[in-house]
Image (spheres, rainbow, N blue to C red):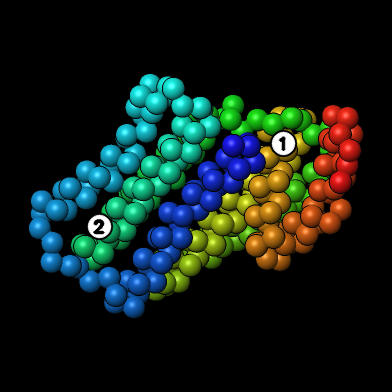
Amino acid sequence: MKPTGLLSISVGLLVVPAIYMLVAVLLAQQGALGAAPISARTLALLWCAGLACLLVPLAFPRGLASLARSTRLVLAVVVSVGATFFGLVLTFATGRLAPLWLLGAGSMLAILTWSFAFRDCLRAEPLARIVSRYTTALFALAALSLISAAVRALRWDPTASDLDLASSAFLIFGDACVAIAASCTARLRQRGSPYARPATTVLSWALLGVPVLGTAVGVYWLVAVRRQERDSAAQSAGQPTR
């Protein structure tokens, strides 16, 4: 699998726990998260299954050594995000959000850890030509997203409803993710890193769904930057452009 596809899988699964958490809070706010009649033994098994999803991938590097590293990376992140599912089941079973918070956070940390451990799978050919204006736009987007996250954090109201708190937390999380991703991608582009190409592609497509500045930056990449950098790479490789 190509580095861009692998990075897309890791990023997509990283967001899943946050979405699950938001949905659980919405259901709890509507009173649809009542505890179900379930035995203590079943609860223990669910906890064990959730923790196993976080620990089992540790055996992948040795137990699945015959598989390609890219395959092991996909298996590791997919199994890791499974802990979030068991956290959601426990949340419905107990009527408490804590299991989902704990296992969801564990899933996100595990996905980040495995993506870093298998980072060699995310390397691609360096960009032959880097559009510096787009790099600057990413730095500007990162700064504005960071400011937005800080403003939301300063306006945090502990007395607000659970729904408002969850919405604010999700927006802060989103702004922080955009700020970190945009600044890291811009820095990779500056350095001409082999990670710059997949990072730029995945981030730029994702920004199309981040209003309003994110969408503008994503459209700019799609219309004015993507073709320039792709054609330059094709020419340097001696391939005809399309």
Which quadrant of the view contains residue 207? bottom right
Callout 2: SS: helix
Left or right of 38: which side holds 207?
right
66 or 103, nearer to the observer: 66
x, y percent for residue 41: 10, 51
Left or right: 96, with 119 as reference point: left
Query: Circle 1 sits on which residue?
Result: 196
CA gap between label 1 and label 2 equals 39 Å
| Depth order, front residue of 141/208 | 208
| Residue at 53% over, 32% down | 70
Residue pictured at 25% horizontal, 57% vertical: 90
Sequence-earlier tag: 1 or 2:
2
- With respect to residue 191, does 149 lie above or below? below
**What's under tag 2, amino acid-wise?**
Leu
**Residue 178 position within the rendered picture, expressed as x and y whole percent measured from the top left:** 63, 52
Height in image: 81 above or below 18? above
Q: Which residue is mark 2?
A: 90
Amino acid residing under circle 1: Ala
Give the answer, above or below, for where 113 lies relative to 106: above
